[in-house]
Image: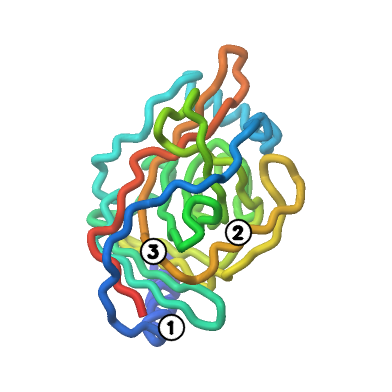
């Protein structure tokens, strides 16, 4: 019965999104680095129950999730903008996990604001960083707006999370190999999950790329979280927008 309700919800959401789409092929764009400031990542330790995440991992320098999993391959993404909001339907090559078995990963929508303001949907068990989660072990999909910056010491050439909303802008529904990210506002004000300070991020609606990614937390010798690296950023095979 729950599956039937979820399928009905997904079909309705897709239908609403599809109603505002007009087909047009988006040329592929490389993700551009921005000057997002990345000084000091100690705020990660303030995220509720992050120690549980570290204990579940059992390793202070974990390896990234295997990027060859087919749910990390986005076959097609259809995006639209209306009333200062972004709608997107993503089709992965394989079944998208919802039980935490896929590790920490997600999908992102990049605009002309680059890495300074990104719309993302993520799943991970072991850390409570979203108002949508019931507890730290809840791997349910949820949205964030994030900014990324440089942390070459911990992440090398890969970007690191520098700010992230505790609130979940818009909605996300995942079923089988589909993910629907809907009603994502062009600007959002909430709370930074790293510092509890007010945070406003404004990605806008000029979508440039749709990607998958893997999250890799980096711990120091004392067990403190130094950084969260965003690895294996991969563009969708095809992007269609209005």
What numbered label is drawn on residue 168? Answer: 2
Which residue matches tag 3?
208
Q: Quadrant of residue 129?
A: top right
Label whose residue precedes the other's in the sequence (1 or 2): 1
The outermost residue toward the right is: 197
Determine the residue positioned at 62% across, 27% down: 51
Q: CA distance from mark 3 to mark 1?
A: 22 Å
What SS does tag 2 mark?
loop
* Residue that protrudes farthest toward the front in the picture: 35
Visible in this render: residue 1?
A: no
Q: Which residue is mark 1?
A: 16
Element at badge 1?
helix
* Residue 236 against residue 161 in the figure, above or below: below
Going from N to C along the chain, the mark reached first, 3 or 1, is 1
Q: Nearer the viewer, mark 3 or mark 2?
A: 3
Real-space Cα separation, disc 3 to disc 2, in angstroms: 21 Å
Q: Is residue 189 visible?
A: yes
List x then y, in percent, for residue 242: 36, 80
Percent x, y of residue 93? 23, 56
Give SS at disc 3.
strand
Q: Is residue 46 left or right of residue 153?
A: right
Left or right of 183 on screen, residue 20: left
């Amino acid at each position: 019965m729950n599956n039937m309700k979820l399928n009905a919800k997904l079909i309705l959401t897709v239908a609403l999104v599809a109603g505002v789409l007009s087909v047009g092929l988006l040329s592929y764009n490389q993700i551009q680095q921005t000057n997002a400031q990345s000084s000091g990542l100690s705020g990660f330790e303030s995220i509720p129950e992050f120690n549980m995440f570290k204990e579940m991992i059992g390793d202070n320098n974990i390896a990234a999730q295997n990027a060859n999993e087919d749910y990390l391959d986005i076959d097609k993404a259809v995006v639209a903008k209306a009333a200062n909001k972004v709608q997107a339907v993503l089709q992965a090559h394989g079944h998208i996990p919802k039980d935490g078995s896929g590790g920490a990963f997600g999908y992102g929508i990049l605009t002309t604001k680059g890495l300074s303001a990104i719309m993302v949907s993520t799943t991970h068990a072991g850390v409570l960083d979203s108002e949508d989660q019931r507890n730290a072990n809840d791997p349910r999909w949820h949205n964030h707006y994030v900014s990324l910056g440089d942390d070459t010491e911990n992440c090398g050439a890969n970007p690191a999370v520098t700010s992230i909303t505790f609130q979940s802008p818009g909605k996300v529904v995942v079923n089988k190999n589909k993910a629907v990210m809907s009603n994502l506002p062009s600007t959002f004000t909430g709370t930074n999950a790293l510092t509890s300070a007010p945070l406003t991020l404004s990605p806008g609606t000029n979508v440039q790329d749709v990607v998958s990614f893997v999250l890799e937390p980096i711990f120091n010798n004392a067990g403190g979280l130094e950084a969260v690296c965003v690895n294996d950023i991969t563009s969708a095979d095809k992007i269609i927008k209005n």
